[in-house]
Amino acid sequence: MVLNEELSSHMPLENRPELRVDPRSDLILAANAAACQFYQQSESTLMQTPLHELLSSRSAQLDPLTQLPNRQLFLDRLQQSLTELQRSPSGLAVLFIDLDRFKPINDSLGHQAGDAVLIEVAQRLQSLLRKQDTLARIGGDEFVVLLKEVTAIQAVERIAQTLLNALALPFEIPQGVVEIGGSIGVAMGPQDAQTAEALLQKADLAMYRAKHNGRQQWMFFSQALGQEAQRKFHMEQSLREALEADELKLQFEPIINAAETKLFALEVQVCQQSLDLLGQDWESLLPVLSQSILGVQFSEWQLQAALEVQQSLSQSSLFVPMAVSVPGIHFRQKSFVDFVETALHESEVDPQLLILQLDESSLNHSSMDVAQRIHALNELGVQVVLEQFGLQGVSLLQLARLPFAAIKVGDLGLRNLSHGRRVPMHENTQLAAAILAFAYQLNKTLIATQIYSNDQWHFMQSQHCQWGQGPYLGKAMSAEALVDYLVDLNAQRLEPVDRDDCDPLYENFDD
């Protein structure tokens, strides 16, 4: 019941037309008395309810910034609409909208600028919808739309594209003109799900696929997406159980300079037996680690397990740096540097024997935050390396400004270079040469990965890449085999890198 002037009126009950009943029988008189009593009780309850409580109940259903319905109100309306479909031949659609390139606005212009954009987004989207549709903000830069009375998929497609076009237009805010965009996932009711939560979740899955496919596009939920989500769920479950049961084991792949016969470091990896136990290969597992909070748990385990091995080697007077990959979801946590410092202290490992590897996805964050974390790690004595450079399109300007000690270059499509013949300058090698030339100009140590053949290694060396790893240069080994390998280094004419070496990675290691 809406609170208005009529509710506070003290008009006598007998003068209120809605309560007038023709007293033609005892039955009607009884009904009249019951109606009067009910009205008096309802009015008394309303008048005794503080105004601020009524307003609070209303505001609790709205997003305080945009005044749009919040998540709970949206779900209530969606569930009601799904129930009504049982009596209607039409359907409905849920559009899950995630803004693209919104976070840099908050980071560079401040939260007031971000709030101004969100308010304008809400107004712009609302103006394109019908009265019977619902637009809600469910958190951060995420909006959802409920389209009712849907009779054709084509109509939903047109609306989704219209909303994307509106988001692609420049936004004029007090801080200046900014441009964003959006990715939209669509789920249809009741075909895709019969409950509000399930339908919203499926629209969310479709949105993530649209964003993964390049942003500024819409995508419908499909059974294939649902099956992919199921596979991801089972993968996470298997990994969680393996971590809890301490069933995962590490292996160590040497990074060497074949020309100078020096060992640069040992890269820490999950051993093949553990991957077989999970029923996954490493490439399939990476997205789970980068997108799920489980990636933090795995990263903590991997770093601590590597430091345990490092501690054991140090007790045998074997001192070799270990390179440990860190998922972006872990690196971006504010407590990450403190975690590393605590782990080093508890293991009593020299920080200079630890190298942390970040991939380009870790840089999808405030450049200032990334630089501060890397500097903080450097102050501990830990060096940071960028891995898989050239595969994910990191900003070259951002890369030039960040204090990476070295850059690891991925496969770059060179794995299939034929053995025994001159490296052809086809498209892949031209691209690789350009990427390596840029990295070399940054005065960073270059490390080639996934070296499978002599031709591949020869080409990388011709592009100023003297450090490498991969099956051709040295196979990964278990922790048990490490000691024998390191003891036999002299027999193989390999020796650990001297910290006084002039290599750039160690220029900050002065005692």
Image (cartoon, rainbow, N blue to C red):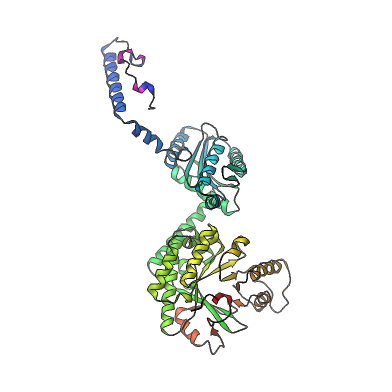
The quarter holding residue 471 reads bottom right
Q: What is the residue that sits farthest to the bottom in this orientation?
A: 491
Residue 469 seen from this side: no
184 w.r.t. 305: above or below: above
Q: Is residue 155 left or right of residue 79?
A: right
Q: Indicate left or right for 104 with 71 as reference.
A: right
* Image quadrant containing the N terminus: top left
Viewer-side residue, 422 vs 281? 422
Q: Identify the residue shown where x is 42% and y is 76%.
A: 349
Expressed as whole percent of the image width and height from the top left, the position of residue 117 reads 54, 43
Left-right relation of 412 to 92: right
Task: Inspect the magenta stretch and tell me whether residue 437 lies in it.
Answer: no
Magenta stretch holds residue 13: yes
The residue lying toward the viewer, choosing from 46 and 279, is 46
Above or below, 405 against 222 in this view is: below
Tell me if I can see residue 123 in this picture. Answer: yes
Question: Does residue 366 sit above or below 195 in this rendering?
Answer: below
How many discs mark residues in the rendered view?
0
Of residues 203 and 446, which is closer to you in this image?
A: 446
Q: Position of residue 176 (x, y in %)?
A: 59, 45
Q: Is residue 153 left or right of residue 295?
A: right
Residue 370 screen position, x and y as percent: 52, 61
Q: Looking at this rendering, what residue extends furthest in the top direction?
A: 24
- Closest to the observer: 14 or 381? 381
Task: Give, as a single range, the part of the protein colored magenta.
Answer: 7-17
Residue 273: x and y in percent read 47, 73
Determine the image quadrant of residue 435: bottom right
